[in-house]
Image (cartoon, helix red, strand yellow):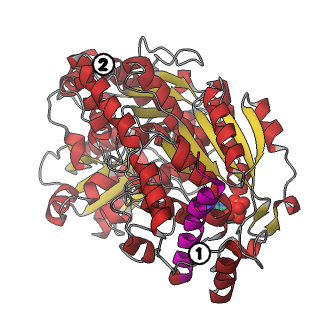
């Protein structure tokens, strides 16, 4: 047991690194690191299982700083504990361009950071996914290989966000007993005391969702250790309310919102040095303190070495499979399964909704890609994301491959990020496209982090019909296409759906959204070969009978509409080609010359998509005509709506003829 003096000095090292780095950057958030330094010190010196020399050791405990604004807490701890890359120079470069110490923690920048946080509420919900992944992988590979905890430090703001309720609800229901949340209960947010905007009994709220809860003095190391020890033994997830003082140690600013998000100023830092008895200069760590920290960091290597030995002793096939999954490499059999779906689709013929096509794809690929973990936000029968034979995960049995997320789109999307960040599983969800808005903050983070999560978003346009405009996406395709690094794919038939699934799975460094129809669509592609024609983002799906006078461009359900319009135009003597564009992003990433070839030089160009035009000009040019939506939809059968809003073969053909006349 550390003496109280040693503990205090180790915690003060965090406080001064944070204070001095924020001062040097002239921006940042010193209040949280100063207030939560005792919690972090106990966690990282006595409880957390980690090895700074192996930041990606698969069975390390995960630590998520949900309150990302407190990033200097993490950087200080990583530096002190001995993460090699987080040098004192990097701490001095806090918030500078290209540093390993950005304003908010970014896992893809700094080793030792488990997830990117900053948008409040995301971290706690992402951690739920990490804890789920741990359970699922332990069920598959056994406790010798997978047995770790997930710790979260969250703030008042994290708990004010609605997503925290979805996270709490999921974790409580699933009995994620290895999830431990420490709440930095300082009663202060940016506007002042939290009591000006809320009065929830957070412990009662979490208890109601099935959590163990406790309240401690967050500056008492023994109480912190006792609470964490009890939490590890609990059969439920645990919330520890740690009562702390924001900006602890600052004579004038402690306990006030003034220390939340601005530098303390030279005078106040000097006063804090005096108050805490800290004589070291900025960015200097007294030798005894650094030695204490480094010893704590080094202590984890024994557990890591023991784990290495256990993995080495595991049956060879299990070990190879575990390593493959952690590396994120796909099984070779995937390609064959994709071709098999295409062959079946072509042989069956007939019209199928792409959500059903997707289900068929899943029936073929999930048996050969066992790391896929599906789910739906209470729309399983509508999203068709449950493959044949897939078993649901239950609180007591995580051997399944499907998650009933409940009506919790946001919590689902954040937890999916945690599942993929954990490594070993590829999460895919089910939801309605219109409710992708509810997932958006988490999808955005997945795109920023470059994580392979796959969102299956069905009921993709007015084509869904009677449910009406509340359920009919109009602007959502454009909104999703606006997110950098997100692959938005809208396949036109079963063959394209299979190809888009293959692309999504192979896109290791980016999330995907598969946009699927509720209504049946005819099969257009009859080539069932290993070639993935969707991979280029756009391709000519129907050639013109002679030099093309018109090019029609469409995605998803409107490709068949364009094909009908092309027939009409051909019958009127206008050679017409059709280009299917399953993905804007993949198309726009191709060289300009290749794109120009696909777009072609026909004098008439018409794009058609049952959505707003935004985004299309970059593909077809602002001179092209567009047939789509300019308003919300309406409640009626889908076919009637297509006619009502002018998404018809005749209208598309007429637009092409108009263009030819003007040419
Ligand atoms: C979703 C979201 N909304 C708003 C913010 C801006 N913001 C950063 S910290 C914060 C609240 C600070 O209060 P608290 O969470 O208690 O942190 P503390 O003051 O204790 O450091 C807000 C509103 C954010 N980061 N994320």
Q: Nearer the viewer, residue 33 or 196?
A: 33
SS majority, magenta: helix
Q: How many marks?
A: 2
Q: Residue furthest left?
A: 546
Q: From which residue to which does the magenta span run? A: 1-23
Q: Is residue 504 magenta?
A: no
Tell me the crowding category of disc 2: few under 14, some 14 to 19, or many 20 or more residues within 10 angstroms, Cα based: many
Per the image, the residue denoted by label 2 is: 364
Is residue 284 shown above or below 497? below
Q: Is residue 48 visible?
A: yes
Residue name at image x 68 percent, y 62 percent: 35
Q: Nearer the viewer, residue 273 or 98?
A: 273
- Quadrant containing ligand 1: bottom right
Horizontally, residue 76 falls left or right of residue 343, namely: right
Q: Secondary structure at mark 2?
A: helix
Per the image, the residue denoted by label 1 is: 19
Label 2 C-beta lies within 8 Å of the nearest ligand 1 atom: no
Q: Quadrant of residue 141?
A: top left
Q: Quadrant of the N terminus?
A: top right
Q: Nearer the viewer, residue 385 or 30?
A: 30
Horizontally, residue 208 falls left or right of residue 262, namely: right
Q: Quadrant of residue 60?
A: top left
| Distance from the alpha carbon under mark 2 to that under mark 1 | 55 Å
């Amino acid at each position: 047991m550390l003496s109280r003096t040693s503990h205090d000095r180790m915690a003060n090292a965090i406080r001064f690194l944070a204070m001095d780095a924020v001062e040097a950057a002239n921006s940042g958030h010193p209040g949280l690191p100063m207030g939560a330094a005792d919690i972090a010190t106990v966690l990282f010196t006595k409880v957390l299982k980690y090895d700074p020399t192996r930041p990606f050791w698969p069975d390390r405990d995960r630590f998520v700083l949900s309150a990302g604004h407190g990033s200097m807490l993490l950087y200080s701890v990583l530096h002190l504990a001995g993460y090699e890359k987080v040098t004192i120079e990097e701490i001095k470069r806090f918030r500078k361009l290209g540093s390993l110490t950005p304003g908010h923690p970014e896992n893809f920048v700094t080793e030792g950071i488990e997830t990117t946080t900053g948008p409040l509420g995301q971290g706690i919900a992402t951690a739920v996914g990490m804890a789920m992944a741990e359970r699922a992988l332990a069920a598959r590979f056994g406790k010798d290989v997978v047995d770790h905890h997930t710790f979260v430090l969250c703030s008042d703001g994290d708990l004010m966000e609605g997503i925290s309720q979805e996270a709490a609800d999921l974790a409580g229901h699933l009995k994620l007993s290895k999830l431990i949340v420490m709440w930095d209960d300082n009663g202060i947010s940016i506007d002042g005391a939290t009591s000006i905007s809320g009065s929830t009994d957070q412990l009662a709220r979490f208890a109601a969702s099935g959590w163990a809860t406790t309240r401690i003095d967050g500056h008492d190391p023994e109480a912190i250790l006792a609470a964490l020890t009890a939490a590890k033994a609990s059969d439920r997830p645990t919330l520890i309310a740690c009562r702390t003082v924001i900006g602890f140690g600052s004579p004038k600013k402690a306990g006030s919102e003034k220390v939340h998000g601005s530098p303390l100023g030279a005078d106040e830092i000097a006063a804090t040095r005096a108050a805490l008895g800290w004589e070291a200069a900025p960015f200097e760590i007294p030798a005894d303190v650094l030695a204490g920290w480094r010893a704590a960091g080094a202590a984890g290597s024994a557990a890591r070495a023991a784990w290495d030995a256990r993995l080495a002793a595991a049956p060879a096939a299990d070990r190879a499979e575990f390593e493959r999954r952690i590396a994120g490499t796909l099984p070779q059999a995937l390609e064959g399964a994709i071709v098999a779906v295409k062959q079946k689709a072509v042989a069956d013929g007939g019209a199928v909704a792409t959500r059903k096509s997707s289900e068929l794809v899943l029936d073929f690929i999930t048996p050969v890609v066992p790391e896929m973990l599906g789910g739906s936000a209470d729309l399983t029968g509508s999203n068709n994301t449950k493959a044949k034979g897939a078993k649901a995960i239950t609180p007591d049995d995580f051997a399944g491959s499907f998650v009933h997320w409940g009506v919790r789109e946001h919590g689902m999307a954040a937890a999916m990020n945690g599942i993929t960040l954990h490594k070993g599983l590829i999460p895919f969800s089910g939801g309605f496209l219109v409710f992708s808005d509810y997932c958006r903050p988490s999808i955005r983070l997945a795109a920023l982090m470059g994580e392979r999560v796959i969102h299956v978003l069905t009921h993709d346009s007015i084509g869904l019909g009677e449910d009406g405009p509340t359920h009919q996406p109009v602007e959502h395709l454009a909104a999703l296409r606006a997110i950098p690094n997100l692959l938005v794919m809208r396949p036109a038939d079963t063959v394209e759906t299979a190809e888009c699934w293959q692309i999504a799975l192979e896109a290791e460094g980016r999330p995907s959204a598969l946009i699927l129809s509720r209504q049946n669509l005819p099969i257009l592609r009859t080539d069932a070969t290993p070639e993935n024609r969707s991979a280029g983002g756009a391709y000519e799906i129907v050639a013109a009978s002679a030099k093309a006078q018109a090019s029609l461009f469409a995605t998803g359900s409107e490709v068949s509409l364009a094909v009908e319009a092309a027939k009409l135009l051909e019958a009127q003597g206008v050679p017409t080609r059709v280009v299917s564009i399953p993905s804007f992003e993949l198309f726009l990433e191709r060289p300009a010359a290749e794109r120009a070839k696909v777009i072609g030089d026909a004098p008439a160009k018409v794009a058609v998509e049952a959505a707003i035009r935004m985004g299309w000009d970059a593909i077809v040019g602002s001179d092209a005509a567009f047939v789509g939506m300019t308003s919300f939809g309406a409640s009626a059968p889908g076919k009637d709506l297509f006619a009502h809003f002018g998404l018809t073969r005749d209208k598309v053909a007429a637009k092409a003829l108009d263009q030819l006349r003007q040419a």
